[in-house]
Structure formats: structure tokens, C-alpha cells
Image (spheres, helix red, strand yellow):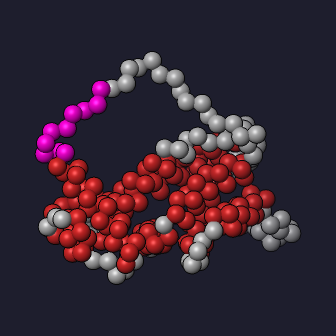
Amino acid sequence: MRKSIPPTPSTEPEPAPVKLGLRERGKQEKRRRIKQAARDVFLEKGYDAATTREIAERADVAIGTLFVYAKDKRDLLMMIINDDLDQLNRTLTDALQDAPLIDQLTDFFSRRYQYWASEPRLSRPAVQETFDFLSGSTGQGPETARFYARRGRIVDLLSAIIKNKQDAGKICTEYGPDEIASLFMTIYLTEVRRWLSDEHPQVDAGISHLRKLMLIALCGVKPAPGEADA
């Protein structure tokens, strides 16, 4: 049975909305236009063929103004992805509280699969950026740094799920929750990249294969004595 974590009641009054000044509203409007122009051009032409000059023209800003908001084309892509994933991550706290671990993990990652499948022309280069980061890519703009910082927060969310199972005596405590969470994150990152290489990635097929790999990690391959000696 899927049981969601209920929201924590609050007796604090909702804060009054902050009234933005004219300058700040102008900056937000420029950012909105730049982000929308980048999304449109990336989807129309593909990430590799898109240029920052065309995006600036589409947003009706000078090229120098565009670079105030994003360091380069990669930073523009990350601007789009960041805002989308921040919204997605806010839903991840609505986890399956009492479900088996494999169901919790599947639910956790399936939401990201659904997002990546919605716009593969944006998803493929974004996922590739994760691998470039892991291989030591440098020269990050602010939006790219924000994208990479999210990976630590995702591992923290996974670690909390793992720790709850360990505290309940459902899985072993031989390994720390961070280590186990990193294992599942690595499986996800590798598998989602393979899945997105399909011309038309299907969420059900992708998450089914990911679930199978996670089950292997959970159950192990049951080695004979001597096959897994440290």
C-alpha cells in the first residue's frame, strides 16, 4: 500500500510576498526571456547546433547581457534543467514510507525518468554533463555549479531512505547509508544515460530495467565461497 508522508502542520503564518523593485523585476523578466529562448532554440535545432548569439537575439537581449545570466551555452542548458529539477525534487519528499525498499527506490527514480523522457533533446546533453563533471570537467558557470551541487542533495535523500530501512532492521548495517545510496546513484546515472540513447526512450521500459539492476544490487549474485574474498 502506498503511504505518503503527511505534510508537517505549521502554526507559523505564511510570510507576506516580497514586493520586488523595478530593477529586480526587470532582471527576472530578462532571465525568463533568456531561459525560454534557450529552451526553444535547443528544442528546434538541438543543443550542439544552437548558438548563444541566436538565443540572445531570440530573447531580445544583447549578447553581453546574456553572459551576465549564463557563462556559456552549457550554463543556459543548466538554467533550464535546474529550475525544472528543483520543482521535481520538492516532490521527492513524498516518499513511500512503509513500502519495500525496491519499491521506494523505483518510485524515487521513476519521477526523474518521466522528466527526462519529456524532452530528450534537452535531457541527453544534460545527463552527459553529469558524466563530464565526474570525469573532471572544469570551467563551471553558476548554473552548471548549481546543477552539480544537486547530486549531493539527491544522495542525501537516498541516504535517508536507506537509513530508515537500516534503523527498522530491514537491511544490513555493514555499509553506511551514504555508501549504499552512492551505489544506487551510480547504477541510475549509468543506466539513464544508456536509456536516453534510444531514439524514443520509453519510461516503463527504462524504469523496469533499472529496477532489475537495483534488485541485483540488493540481492547480490550469491557467489560461491572464495569468489568474493576481499
Q: Quadrant of the N terminus?
A: top right
Query: Quick one: which residue is furthest to the right in this view?
Result: 224
Residue 147's quadrant in the figure? bottom left
Indicate the position of residue 43 as horizontal and vertical percent values: 40, 72
Magenta stretch, main secondary structure, is: loop
Given residues 103 and 184, the one toward you in this image is 103
- Say if 48 sits above or below 102 in the image: below
Q: Position of residue 210 (x, y in %)?
A: 67, 64
Q: Name the image quarter holding the C terminus.
A: bottom right
Note whether residue 200 is visible. Answer: yes
Q: Residue 192: x, y in percent?
A: 58, 68
The answer to whether residue 171 is left or right of residue 175 is: right
Question: Which residue is at 75% across, 46% downward?
Answer: 100
**In percent of the image, x 83 and y 65: which residue is there?**
222
- In magenta segment, residue 133: no
Residue 32 at x, y percent in the picture? 27, 55
Residue furthest toward the bottom? Answer: 49
Q: Which segment is the magenta one?
A: 16-25
Instruction: Answer whether residue 167 is visible to the viewer in this image.
Output: no
